[in-house]
Amino acid sequence: MTSATELPAPAPADPGTGTTGLGTSPLRTDALPKALGIYPYAADLWAEGLLWGAVLRSPHPHARIVSVDTAPALAIPGVHAVVTAADLPPGPDGTPDGAPAGPVTADRPVLAAGVVRHHGEPVAAVAADHPDTARLAAAAILVEYEPLEPVTDPEAAFHAAPLHPDGNLLRHLPLRTGDPDAVGAVVVEGLYQVGRQDPAPIGAEAGLAVPRPDGGVELHLSSTDPHGDRDRTAACLGIDPDRVRLVVTGVPGATTDREDLSFQVTLALLALRTGRPVKMTLTRAESFQAHTTRHPALLRYRHHADAEGRLVKVEAQILLDGGAYADVSAEALAAAVAFSVGPYTCPNVFVDAWAVRTNNPPAGRMRGEGALQTCFAYESQLDQLAKQLGIDPVEIRRRNAMTTGDPLPTGQAVTCPAPVRALLDALDTTPLPALPLDDPEADWLLPGGPGGAGDPAAVRRGIGYAVGMVHMLGAEGEDEVATATVRVSGDHATVICAAVDSGQGFATLARQIVQSVLGVSEVYIAPVDSDQSAAGPSARGRHTWVSGGAVERAALMVRHQMLQPIAADFGMSVELLTINDGKITSYDGVLGMPVSEALEGRELWATAQCRPHPTEPLDPETGQGDAFVSIAFCAMRAVVDVDIELGAVRVVDVTVAQEVGRALNPRQIEDRIEGAVAQGVGLALLENLRTEGGVPVNASLTGYRLPTALDTPDIRIAALLEERDVVAPFGAKAVSAVPAVVAPAAVAAAVRAATGLPVGRLPIPPEDAIVPV
Amino acid sequence: MEHGGNLVNRTIMLPASVDEAVEALAVTPGAVPVAGATDLMEAVNAGRLRPAALIGLGRITELRGWRYEDGGTAVLGAGLTHARMDRPDFAALIPALADAARTAGPPQVRNVGTLGGNIATAAPTGDTLPVLAALEATATLARAGAVREVPISHLLTGLDPLRPGELLTWVRVPLLHAPQVFLKSTGRSGPARAAASVALVLDPARRGVRCAVGAVAPVPLRPLEAESWVAGCIDWDARGAEGAVLIDPAALAAFGEYVAGACVPEGGAHGEGAGSAAARLRRTVAVLARRALGRALK
């Protein structure tokens, strides 16, 4: 970051307000270096005398490993070490088991032992003095496989022979509430499929491991959960967690967990084995094999409604393909079940949901895991109901919308603000984009893109609406806690908090919080490493809440220390002093002291924790329980143009209304919504990591189609509703996940409106948008 | 960065003329000529290709433009970039080739990727290839002391392939002074490889329609029977007349089906039925061919 100091000063906070702190939109300090390409990522790291790591991966989705011969690799000059499962601590029975680990269940080996369960599973790793040598040596390792029949159909996983000692059923969660015999005047049924979205981060996995003199190892990685990763890495290596230090480097894009555990442990093992620093950077093709994807899903729904369109009963069967290992499938399943009806009230809900193990690529965390898949299904069902009853799609949603205090099907009352109707109403305050007929001068980008085959005569426009929800923070009794330290020395403050800014803007937010509370303008955010107190993973929108809350508390404690002597001097209580625009003033206006004067020569610090109220697991028989801390809501209107002969779809415009509690940094919120909508549009139309017999067939950025600027619509914010969530620090809700959850459903609804076709698959294949002649 | 190692100790030659380049090719067996490198370097970086030597063609300025010959032919340098072909002066000359160049990948690729590279790589989805097939273009292949002329289609099908030591230097394209269309279906708005593409050119002097379908087979396919049938359906004499209808709309649709039937085989044993991949591809090609002819005759 040294180079950043040579840049022009960042743009001042919003002109007009003249203040810093919460509610303003200061530019992120890393924005300019990132845009200029000079921001250092893990792939840019270097250490004197480093070796290069490379991994040998399974070419089979399912096979028994008969033998591994590393001798040919070791014979290559320049190769310093070759490691396999045998180099990791043995399992309970004394034989190598690959040191299995995982975020919930420890079932995924670092290096495959005896069996490979998905294509690309790491089998061995090499450290050599040149990256090419390392790759050649990895390829020279002789592995004899006995290929086994892969289980690639999640429906077949139930009856297939166990792929893992833990079995093929990762979780079954039923939900039963209300009267099973209730019947509505209208019944609609649907079958919905969601494909495999890959996070495809901008930067592929990379890291550097440096051995320490005490026998430990220091890992420089773009981790999003430094303490969790440290503990799991130490456990896999069989060493004390204090011997592993994890230093977080710039994170090049994270809508999932980074980096996968196998990568970290392998890197550390190679460094420990060779006594040299080891660097490893994955190619794009390897990156697709290494990280987890979104859960492909199959959803069967039956909605009963009365003649006015009010929901009477919802029945659903949900099947998530967890891939080869458990990862967070159990969590994703809980979200899928709890939000199976969506932000609507329905008295009778009967759901059965399963997450199963297959030989497909492992699925894991990715913005709105579980909630996204069901959002597509329940919103599609509401469109069907509206069509059947001849009710406007927005009106049917308004009639069923939940509000604060309504129960989820899990029995939990939604105590946070849930202004679903207000969100829907806000959408139409923003005018629709012009039709080409109304604005013939404008350059009309036809579906198919510039130079494509689009023909205006075959283009139909459609407008679709969707509403969705996602929970924030860990669910089902997970202990959520973060610790932060704020130190003030002279005229500047330092924040030490192990919350990783994975691109969500936490560093900017922490700076704003301290500026608001202490009136100090210079705030330094310390780089994150695992020697600091834990703040937990960057996921589920938790850092705004728990880490932001911890920073605020620590800053408030420092504020008290700063103001107490002044208050004592004037014979008043601290509560009668306020800090505004860098000045301490008393309620009566007698005192007006600059903060810098009050702090002169002093050094104050405080450490605080934030731990939201506890939650409980969902009942395994009925799916009932208070499992979530809070829930975010979002409504969207999508406008699409469809070439009904070729099935090409262009999303013209997406308008968003979102409930944010309190807009702590409006510009950052807009950026996050735009990013999430783009990802949602990608899933709706383009992104699908296809597999044939368990083997990905398009694992490259040519084959795996990410949205480009041409595929991304105009994204407009109709409203950011600010109804404070009383239990949340600042009253603010996380913003990044819920637009990604709703966007695919909104685009599907718009394609449905344009074509009159049912649209039951994501991404929408062109043939599903071709209107038969 | 680590891939840079692949080029250590590798000979890279940078000839400044065609003569120097063919000389370099003659003396260095196994050397690979490289222009925009958009396909080649991807293979090198991925370790699929490790050429003994590279001959960079970027300094051969004579191949980066075009000239006219006999009044009726444009001779295009193999080093013409896609970005250059998309410019208005070139588009006025050979509109379909300009259209194809415009859709070939993102701007970064179009700025360096060349016409010659597109032909030499011969990817089934090469966007300029169906246009060159429809135009019945020929390629000039130079080697030390000899030059020969080969139809592009013979080059692509392997009927008369590039021989060792030969360099693709020029592409001869007839100037038809009539509407030409290139249409490509990708299923998205952003740059992508073609699912199917159709190039269609009118040749009013010979009262002919020539059409080629790209991306559905390893090489562009010419539906010759459909071409000659539809040429007979067109009212050539009415061309240029105000408001003239040159073809019956039913014939347009039939042409689309004819082309699709000729270029996309039936689904076969496991792909039969309206929902099969083959049926979908047929429908796409039929729509493209119908629209292409419709636009050419508008």
Image (spheres, coloured by chain):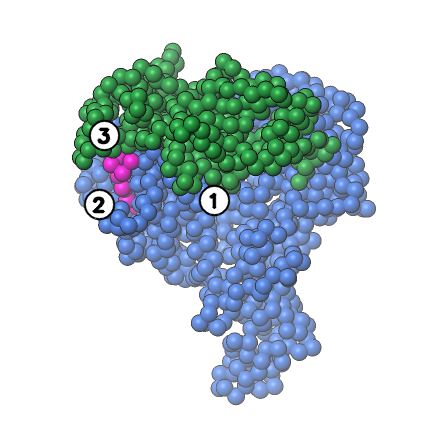
The chain assigned the colour green in the figure is: B
B238 or A673, nearer to the observer: B238
Mark 2 to mark 3 CA distance (whole Å): 50 Å
Residue under mark 2: which chain is it in?
A
Q: Along the horizontal axis of the image, is B159 left or right of A422?
A: right
Residue range (magenta): A455-465
Mark 3 to mark 1 CA distance (whole Å): 58 Å
The chain assigned the colour blue in the figure is: A
**Split into 4 quadrants, where in the image is the C terminus of chain A?**
top left
Which residue sits furthest front?
B70
Mark 2 nearby-residue class (10 Å; few <14, some 14–19, many ≥20): few
Residue A462 is a magenta residue: yes
**Split into 4 quadrants, where in the image is the N terminus of chain A?**
bottom right
Dot 1 amino acid type:
Arg
Mark 1 nearby-residue class (10 Å; few <14, some 14–19, many ≥20): many
Residue under the image location 48 percent in, 73 percent down: A18
Residue under mark 1: which chain is it in?
A
Does the residue at mark 2 contact the one at mark 3 (Cβ under 8 Å)? no
Residue under mark 3: which chain is it in?
B
A396 or A30, nearer to the observer: A30
Q: Along the horizontal axis of the image, is B13 left or right of B259?
A: right
- The secondary element bearing badge 2 is classed as loop
Which residue is denoted by mark 1 in the rendering? A367
- The secondary element bearing badge 3 is classed as loop
Residue under the image location 41 percent in, 22 percent down: B136
Which residue is denoted by mark 2 in the rendering? A392
Q: Along the horizontal axis of the image, is B201 left or right of A563?
A: left
Q: Earlier in the sequence, mark 1 or mark 2?
A: 1
Which residue is denoted by mark 3 in the rendering? B239
Q: Residue A421's x, y, as percent?
A: 29, 54
Dot 2 amino acid type:
Asp
